[in-house]
Image (tube, grey):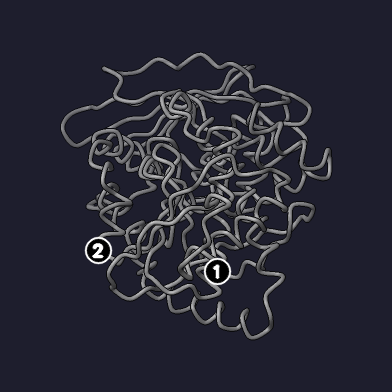
Amino acid sequence: MALVVAVMVVLAAGVAALVLTGDDEPGTDLAADETPSTTTTEGPPTTPAPPTTAAPPPTTEPRTELERAVVELSAFVARERGLEFLRPVQVEFLADGPFEARLLRDVEEEREDVDQSEKVLRALGLLEPGVDLFDTYVSFYGGAVLGFYDPETDELVLRGVELTPYVRGTLVHELTHALDDQHFELHRPEHEEGEDEAAFAFSALVEGVGLAVEHSYQQGLSAEERSQADQEAARFAGRVDYASVPPIVTSLVQFPYLAGPSFVSALVRHGGDAEVDAAFRDPPTTTEQILYPEIYLAGDEPISVPPPPAGGPIIEEGTYGQWILYLTLADVLDGDAADRAADGWGGDSYVAWDEGPSRTCVRMAFAMDTPGDLRELDDAWRQWARAHGDATVDTTADTVTATACG
């Protein structure tokens, strides 16, 4: 499978809204070109509220605050997306413990795949010895996720109980996922089982749309409500010990949320909301297409690169991708140099194998768009290999192949 799919597999529990930190400016609506941030909030342990629906039958009056909010916000989401809800959406509040148990209830099934990806990342020097990738993700998501929509069960779950401005923004975000799921089916296991970046790229599309609608809602809040939401965001962000999370984990988790909105904005500029709907039907399949929407809009497909030879029984194989190529090089090179080297990515494939109980090797073959791009990537990998210490680079007229062990 694609490396990022294995690493991101804990997202299988649902499309989550999680806290992002940093200096990112608030985003814009579907027609804009800025990067929105997600919403999070903190909810005290409480008795779960009863489920409600996004569209009660016409003869049923909303009885609780949650029911009224879901009806009101569902109408907002429907207007923003230009789509109607086709069926009710189950919504519930859960206290911290039950929420985290629900979020991660199936994640143990993916431990073996994530453990294999851990070996690959460690061989590349992207994880320090002793870091357990699976436990790191479980801990990170358990604390960082505020709400999620599960496209397998059609359930929408929020952490806490109070409908603050911050929580309402997250509810808008997740109702957007629910609406898109009803029209376009967000649960696509064939993507997760594939060997390309389709699942990762699709998540950027999904989150880009959710964030755009959420930001549009936030723009309508009063100054007091925005201030309250900002304060809640700061409190919730304090729940997560980001210093203990390896940078590669943070970068992979944040990619759909940071790159998705710009991708969606480009779609809207090109063809309006109809272009966004078309993307759900024929979604992007690479991180290159997310980073450079014009490549997706032009219908350009990646170059097919045969898997390089492995030095033993293969434990993992698939597509490496432009985003993680950049992250790998940026671990050694400065960001601008890594970006220039990764730009012009044409396609790739990688294989990994074990050399003994505590040593793994990974071999990656990259094709680039032009001979100049190939030379630049060759130079970058050679600088990276010297810093890594246990790596080699071989270049032909068509590909750059890097091998690293650790």
Query: Which x, y percent locates residue 103?
Result: 33, 51
Residue 212, disc: none
Say if 343 sits above or below 74 in the image. above
Residue, x 65% and y 54% (percent of image)?
Answer: 77
Question: Helix, strand or loop at disc 2?
Answer: helix
Please name the amino acid that badge 2 sits on. Gly
The residue labelled by disc 1 is 22
**Quarter of the image where one finds residue 367:** top right
Query: Which x, y percent locates residue 394?
Result: 51, 24
Say if 388 sits above or below 308 in the image. below
Residue, x 38% and y 56% (percent of image)?
Answer: 51
Residue, x 43% and y 50% (percent of image)?
Answer: 90
Please name the amino acid that badge 1 sits on. Gly
Q: Nearer the viewer, residue 68 or 157?
A: 68
Give the mark, 2 or 1, whose residue is nearer the N terminus.
1
**Quarter of the image where one finds residue 113:** top left
Question: Helix, strand or loop at disc 1?
Answer: loop
Q: Quadrant of the N terminus?
A: top left
Describe residue 252's horizontal placement relative to residue 106 as left or right.
Answer: right
Say if 36 sits above or below 126 in the image. below
CA neighbours of label 1 inside 10 A, class few (<14), some (14 to 19), many (20+): few
The residue labelled by disc 2 is 97
Q: Nearer the viewer, residue 365 or 146?
A: 146
**Quarter of the image where one finds residue 203:** top right
Q: Nearer the viewer, residue 29 or 64?
A: 64
Residue 406 in view, yes or no = no
Describe residue 99's horizontal placement relative to residue 331 as left or right.
Answer: left
Residue 355 in view, yes or no = yes
Alpha-carbon span between mark 2 and mark 1? 27 Å
